[in-house]
Image (tube, helix red, strand yellow):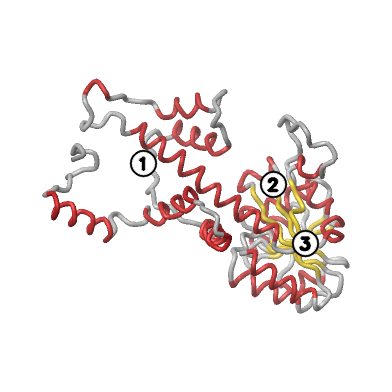
Amino acid sequence: MQLGMIGLGRMGGNIVRRLMRHGHSTVVYDKDAKAVAGLAADGAVGSATLEEFVAKLERPRTAWVMLPAGRITETTIETIAAVMQEGDVIIDGGNTFWQDDVRRGKALKARGIHYVDVGTSGGVWGLDRGYCMMIGGEKQVVDRLDPIFAALAPGAGDIPRTPGRQGRDPRVEQGYIHAGPVGAGHFVKMIHNGIEYGLMQAYAEGFDILRNANIEALPADHRYDFDLADIAEVWRRGSVIPSWLLDLTSTALADSPQLSEYSGFVEDSGEGRWTVNAAVDEAVPAEVLTAALYTRFRSRKEHTFAEKILSAMRAGFGGHKEPTQPGAAKPK
């Protein structure tokens, strides 16, 4: 089957490579001509412009856009839609806001062009591990594109089957799901990333507590000097909290126990914010996910004005002095 890919970054390029490994043909475009040339050398058909890209696709065309969410994706979809025809398909595989999918899907449907949103998880490891995909769109279109999704998916692997799943969609056990109509794929991926924030924050806080278990503020016989790399490793083996995130943490700590090359300045992709907004719209309490998002905001400042207000109030009502270093003073 043929697929066109726009955006040949860390994920887009590897999606193309994985498809070609499985015998599919690809047409590629990126503003970086070197990225196009590199994939063309591996067997893809390169394009110098978006118009040339569309012209090289066989009808019914399928063009996958793998670009950062926002204006660049919007502009790219508008450009290729202008030269595509009835029955063609545009896939957005980036981290787009699901309500933008709904809007785009309606506009493209009026022109006879199908729209599919694919929340894609797998990161830089997807080439070899495969990609978990959460797909939104019309059933007949998603079903027609199944060979593409099946090739990209990780497959069942060695994960034990879940009891009681007889009669359910077998694609789910292969690592991809048709979640519903347009927008549903990115909605599910949005929540996936919101949960990711919470899981990451739980690990981060736990390891921070372990790291500070030997501070001078504690009684001498209550101090422990833990090897965090070894703790991360032992938790991977038989505990109830293993995950790929823990695997990555274990690797990072083994390579650099103090993580000195990291600043601790943590960005957010936007999906954590959208998850919290969805929780507000639905009146669903999401304390952990909200706190994890706010902690990322906090990581970008040494000290906030709010913390200065707290110090001022504590000094005012109790004469409490600020410690010169975190953990240097006992709680009062």
Can you say whether 143 is above or below 156 in the image? below
Q: What amino acid type should be assigned to the residue bearing mark 1?
A: Ser
Please report contact status of discs 2 and 3: CB closer than 8 Å, yes or no: no
> Spatial distance from mark 1 to mark 3, Cα to Cα?
45 Å
Q: Is residue 282 left or right of residue 149?
A: left
For the point 73% across and 55% down, the residue is 135
Q: Nearer the viewer, residue 86 or 50?
A: 86
- Marker disc for residue 137: 3
Q: Nearer the viewer, residue 310 or 322?
A: 310
Quadrant of the rendered structure where residue 110 is? bottom right
Reading the image, the residue beneath label 2 is 132
- Marker disc for residue 170: none
Q: What amino acid type should be assigned to the residue bearing mark 2?
A: Cys
Please report contact status of discs 2 and 1: CB closer than 8 Å, yes or no: no
Please state the horizontal and vertical placement of residue 63, each as a whole percent of the image.
Answer: 76, 64
Q: What amino acid type should be assigned to the residue bearing mark 3?
A: Gly
Report whether residue 28 is seen. Answer: no
Can you say whether 247 is above or below 269 in the image? above
